[in-house]
Image (spheres, rainbow, N blue to C red):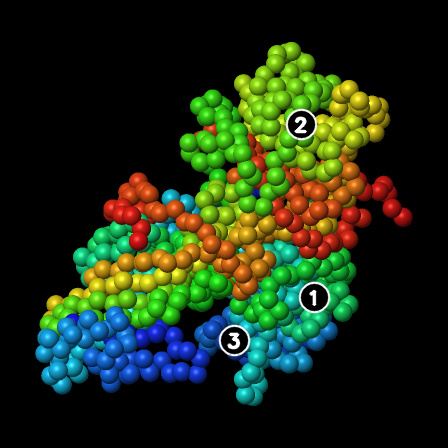
Amino acid sequence: MTSTSKPSRPPKGGAVDNGRRAFFLNVGAAGVSTALASTAAMAASGAADPALRAALLEDEKALRKLHRAFEQAMNTGAYDDAVELFAADAQVVFNGGVFDNRSRGVGRLFRERFRAGKSGKRIEPAPGFELTADEQQEHVEVAADRLSAKAVFPYSIQVGVPIETESSLASMARLHGEGVKTWWEGGVYAVSYRRAAVDAPWEIRKLEYRTLARADYRPGRTYAAPIAVAPISTRYPEDPHGPDALVRPS
Amino acid sequence: MPMRIPMHRYEYTKLTREQIGRALRATESGPTSVSPFTDALTGKSLRIVTQDGPVLEYSFGANRRLTLSENGGPSVSAGYGELTLNEIVFFSHMIPGEQKGYNVFVDQDTDLVTVFEVWFSSGIVQNAGTPNEFTLDDREVQRQIYFGYVDKGQEPPESLHHYTNRIAGKGLYWKQDTGIETLEFYASVANTNFVELTRHIDNLSWVSPSDYVLVNDHTFIYNRTEVEFSGIHTCFVADLFRCEQVGVRLGFNEKDELEYYMFRGTGRVVGQLAYLEPFDEHGKVPLFAQQNPNPPKGARVTYRPARTFRWMSDEEVHEAAERRTAAFVSGPSGVPQVVPSGHNMPFSDILVGKTFTLRFDHGGPVRDYRINDMYKLEYRDHRDNIWREADYRAYEGADNLAWFSHILPGSKPRASVQVAVDFTNGLATSIESHMGTPYYGNETTYRAVFGVVEMEGIEAPLYTRHELTDELVGHAFSWSYSDQLTSMHLYTTPHSMSWTIFTANQTMGAQWCSPCIYVKLRDGVYLFCQNEEACNGVQMIALINTNISHDCGFSFRGGADGVSLSTTGGIGRHIGKFDVREFYGPKRGMQA
């Protein structure tokens, strides 16, 4: 595997690419712990071959681009577009629920559950709940055969659920896209990718939301408080937006 | 004669496209007007270019006839009416043989134009593909607004008239040259809460979707369409320097008579509510285009509750009540609620250890209470003299003033009471509530009864009572039931109110209304009771304490899942006040 890590956001005054460039200039050097093991793997797999190194770099860029496309789709509420980035047999793990298959569970999660809850949109971290520098590390590993890859990307998103009431207030709020109780979640996406051939496009095989913190926070507020959110406990079809299986939340 | 049946209870005829077409033949000569028409356009031609809309080429002849070519198409001849207001020329016409027409506002100083295309028999389907799919009534006038300019060969203007929130929160009294008087509260960027002072016999307020267009700092263009009611359309331009208006009314009234007339009116501002959106939000993107930048023609954010409210008979509701009557429980398993939710006030033990009798006037109920628990009470109605046990929740709504509620077990129709007991003044008020109205079994009926509390140590007054009041009328409060659910109540008239839901940036958005009553308990302390009639039938009964800007109370409802009594309450903010009480109440006799 080839691996790169970088902070997801540059320090003030820094440049985004510095971390990554520094890594490649110092392949094998100490200092980026998650990268070290991968570096060894890369070397063992013959990544010293300049052509392969270049190809791996291109793969890494493509995967980052794919992830940005996923985030962009979530940001804009383009859930249909997001679903199209997944493999047909993809799996998403979210808050204790396992959603299987692009056309079924994954589609249900994003098109229905996320849309109804206005979930997935990137928002700034809740004050006092910012991820640590380590938690903000992005990490991409491409397998030597260039047909699979793994990555970790940090996230800071809005999550919500429709306010469960038959009151007219909620019905009316839904007319203008409200009637949803929202909060902030921060964590990391643990993603695995796959493609059928080296010249085929990458697809998301599995995406897991590993939530590290939750807070009662909406953009514009100056404070936040921690909240507990119950894991998903009802499977589909009993819950029309529910998962195919339940797991213990990470 | 003014209407007597409230609009939300009136069964408007489902006029067919053919019936409407026949009636519209009368519009071929143009609208009527009590005030003399003006002739600013006579002999002139206008080429109006609109943004994302039609190019309209008009020629105005004598005798109030015009010819129109739309988008270079063939010319049609139509009668029109014209009224000017300052620099604005407003003209209105229908297109013969079609069920559409135009209301056009031309600013002669700037050559900017706002065009309303209006039409009947839209066939617009709402909630397509869902169980709640329905087609809009043919009698409901639709409108599409286009902003444009008079093309005189000049460069297109950089800015046009535009939607605005500058009118939000304003209230106006208007009197037309027809004698029609209305109060209009623009307490939303997308709706109007209006009171027909002459068209309706009761002082009730209703809500209609509206648009607000800014012409300049003192001139705005407005329309409302009375959807869910007659479907009639009112459109005018108003000058707020002089509080004058010219406009048009188009549509079918409750008698299915076609109204197509222009009017002049004068009015006055009756107040202003604060609007709470960010200071850099100017309302230029209308609510109907915020979720969808390319909304379908005629689209509006319109609450149409009666379309989804399923009618149930009294018997059906009672059968459901027999299966399940729940008080103060949460969740499907019915866990007793011991802590109030959201921003409600805390439950109180003010009644624990007390034994008292509530005696209501004029043969009203007499009930003995003995209460030794914070959540369960015993009561005995003197009509059957049987002690019963019931779950209850109480608040201390004001100092030494208990506010509690419980189901009347075994009642048919299922009933509940919401009771304010003033242990300082010896006074009591009960809101006697039960399922069923003459219209729906799954609506609630309520009435206030006034009386006294008899208890050791209290000397109850003989004459002094709580009483119905109009002290809240004109006031608006936002009520935040939780951090993410806030509604603004506008207490519009002595018998009605509206509620408005805020959008994400606290712009006042969706709105609806209902009849209600208000009771004064003490200075600054009131009971407010409403049933969301022809909406969902839910009754809210709240104690409003304006001294602490908080309300607390109860919600009583019934439907297929049974009858339930629950709690509600929120933190309030006073949003403003309209000075309108003078407009209400019995009219004086013959006036000089």
Determine crowd level at label 3: few under 14, some 14-19, many 20+ residues with C-alpha closer than 10 A.
many
Please state which of residues A229 and B517 is positioned toward the viewer in this rendering: A229
Residue B14 horizontal side relative to residue A192, left or right:
right
Please state which of residues B535 and B53 is positioned toward the viewer in this rendering: B535
Residue type indicated by callout 2: Leu
Q: CA distance from mark 3 to mark 2?
A: 67 Å
Q: Is residue B12 above or below residue B285?
A: above
Name which quarter of the figure residue B272 lies in: bottom right
Q: Residue B190, how many percent across, how many down? A: 57, 59
Q: Which residue is mark 2?
A: B351
Q: Residue B579, how many percent across, how many down? A: 77, 53
**The residue marked by circle 2 belongs to what chain?**
B
Give residue B305's mark: none
**The residue marked by circle 3 belongs to what chain?**
B
Please count the marks in the image: 3
Q: Residue furthest top?
A: B385
